[in-house]
Amino acid sequence: MENWTSTPFEPFAGLAGGLLIGSSVVLLLYTLGRIAGISGIAAGAMTQQGSERYWRLAFLAGIVLSAVLYIAFTGGMQVQTQMGSAWLVVAGLLVGFGTRLGSGCTSGHGVAGLSRLSPRSIVATLTFMCAAVITTTIIRHL
């Protein structure tokens, strides 16, 4: 069995991240009337035309640019995984399948949907969380 490590408790980093995510959700909803669900934004960036496509591409570019700026200003980013590449590929495919099956992702349902008290998003987020607990339990005890 592998050794599992926990990450350090960093409340201010979590608070800052939460404020940035919440602000972006509110700003997108207020300015364009759109939900900040990444799977929907990414899908629309590939299928939509005109201004509908441009804001989606700008949103996705901002996500990538923020990581690049973080690395530039802090000198790097340590990424540590406890699973092999094959597990990461399988996990990515399952997440992609789940976002299509659930008509959205954790950002759309969990952040934007819950804040609007959407019943569909409440059920979807509970499903995400239960699946995460079950998966983690299985993976840690294999």
Image: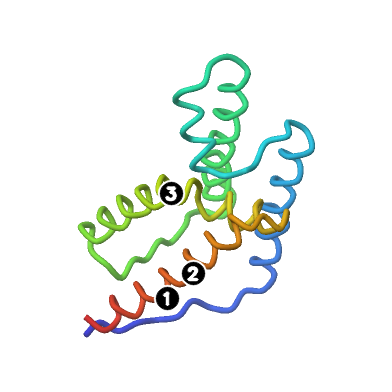
Name the secondary structure under disc 1. helix
- Dot 3 amino acid type: Thr
Extreme residue toward the top, this view: 50
Q: Residues within 10 Å of mark 3 (few under 14, many from 20)?
A: some
Residue nearer the viewer, 38 or 84: 38
Residue 14 is situated, as x and y percent measured from the top left of the image, at: 64, 67
x and y, in percent, of residue 13 in the image: 65, 66
The x and y percentages for residue 77 are: 47, 57
* Amino acid found under the numbered disc labelled 2: Met
- Given the image, on which type of amino acid does mark 1 rest? Val
The circle drawn on residue 133 is: 1
98 on left or right of 16: left
Which residue is drawn at the image coordinates 23% and 63% (left, top)?
84
- Mark sitting on residue 114: none
**Label 2: which secondary element:** helix
* Mark 1 in CB contact with mark 2 (< 8 angstroms): yes
At horizontal 73% and vertical 39% (from top left) the residue drawn is 29
Cα separation between marks 1 and 2? 6 Å
Which of marks 2 and 3 precedes in the sequence?
3
Q: In front: 60, or 134?
A: 134
Work out whether mark 3 precedes mark 1 in sequence or the reverse, and give the earlier one.
3
For image coordinates 41% across by 45% down, the residue present is 100
Question: Is residue 27 found left or right of 34 in the rendered image?
Answer: right
Q: Which mark is residue 99?
A: 3
67, above or below 40, in the image:
below
